[in-house]
Image (cartoon, rainbow, N blue to C red):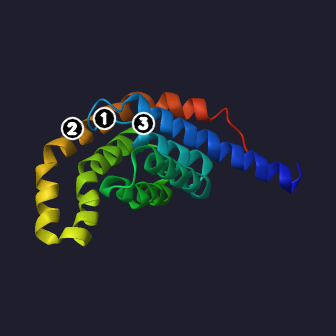
């Protein structure tokens, strides 16, 4: 395959991954802190690597910002999701379902704390702490739902991704 062909396949892969992320986000939009994005980013990073997934994550975040407008939470997406890609790259060789389920759960638990960093910069430490404490109950839901979703879907989605090849 030519270099141009490989580039086109990578660009199409990034577009398809972005569409999957956006569709998954939209599908569960009405259920607070229950999402597939964490699991999908983990799976995409393990399968396609950090560069392709990072490009997809940035496009996903741009689409979210265009759809919902620029706000504190859309700004946080520009560092929260890339951080997940980076952490997944560090642990990508781990094969344990339990490891990834616990990893996903902890990411959900600390999601609010990560989002509070924007509030720390814009409104100070007291506001950031208040933001985080006020959202702990949502972070607990996020933690539990991420764990359950990962336990149920990690293996079947991993197996489905095995059939996708890009050069």
Per the model, the C-alpha gap separating discs 3 and 1 is 9 Å
Q: Badge 2 local density, few (<14 within 10 Å), some, or many (20+)?
A: some
Residue corresponding to mark 2? 141
Q: Residues within 10 Å of mark 3 (few under 14, many from 20)?
A: some
Badge 1 marks a residue whose secondary structure is loop
Q: Are marks 1 and 2 in contact (CB under 8 Å)?
A: yes
Q: Residue at x 75, y 45 (%)?
A: 9
* Picture quadrant of residue 127: bottom left
3 or 2: mark nearer the eye: 3
Residue 60 position within the rendered picture, expressed as x and y whole percent measured from the top left: 51, 47
Query: Exactly how many numbered labels are in the figure?
Result: 3
Residue at image mark 1? 34
Image-based side of 70 in relation to 110, left or right = right
Real-space CA distance between mark 3 and mark 2, rounded to the nearest whole angstrom? 16 Å
* Secondary structure of residue under mark 3: helix
> How many neighbours does mark 1 have within 10 angstroms: few (below 14), some (14-19), or many (20 or more)?
many
> 101 or 9: which is nearer to us?
9
- Residue 137 location (% of width, % of height): 14, 43
The tag earlier along the polypeptide, 3 or 1, is: 3
Residue at x-position 71% and y-position 49%: 10
Task: Report the residue marked by disc 3.
Answer: 25
Going 19% across and 42% down the picture, which residue do you hit?
Answer: 138
- Foreground of the two, 100 or 143: 143
Report whether 91 appears left or right of 134: right
Which numbered disc, 3 or 2, marks the residue that appears first in the sequence? 3
Q: Nearer the viewer, residue 51 or 21?
A: 21
| Residue 22, x across and y down, in percent | 49, 38
């Amino acid at each position: 395959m030519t270099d141009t062909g490989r580039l086109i396949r990578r660009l199409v892969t990034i577009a398809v991954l972005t569409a999957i992320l956006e569709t998954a986000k939209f599908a569960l939009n009405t259920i607070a802190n229950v999402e597939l994005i964490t699991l999908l980013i983990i799976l995409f990073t393990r399968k396609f690597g950090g560069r392709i997934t990072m490009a997809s994550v940035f496009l996903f975040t741009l689409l979210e910002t265009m759809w919902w407008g620029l706000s504190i939470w859309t700004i946080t997406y520009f560092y929260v999701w890339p951080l997940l890609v980076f952490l997944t790259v560090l642990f990508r060789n781990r094969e344990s379902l339990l490891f990834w389920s616990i990893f996903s759960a902890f990411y959900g638990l600390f999601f609010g704390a990560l989002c509070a960093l924007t509030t720390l910069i814009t409104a100070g430490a007291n506001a950031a702490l208040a933001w985080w404490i006020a959202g702990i109950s949502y972070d607990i839901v996020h933690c539990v739902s991420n764990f359950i979703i990962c336990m149920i879907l990690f293996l079947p989605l991993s197996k489905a991704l095995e059939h996708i090849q890009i050069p």
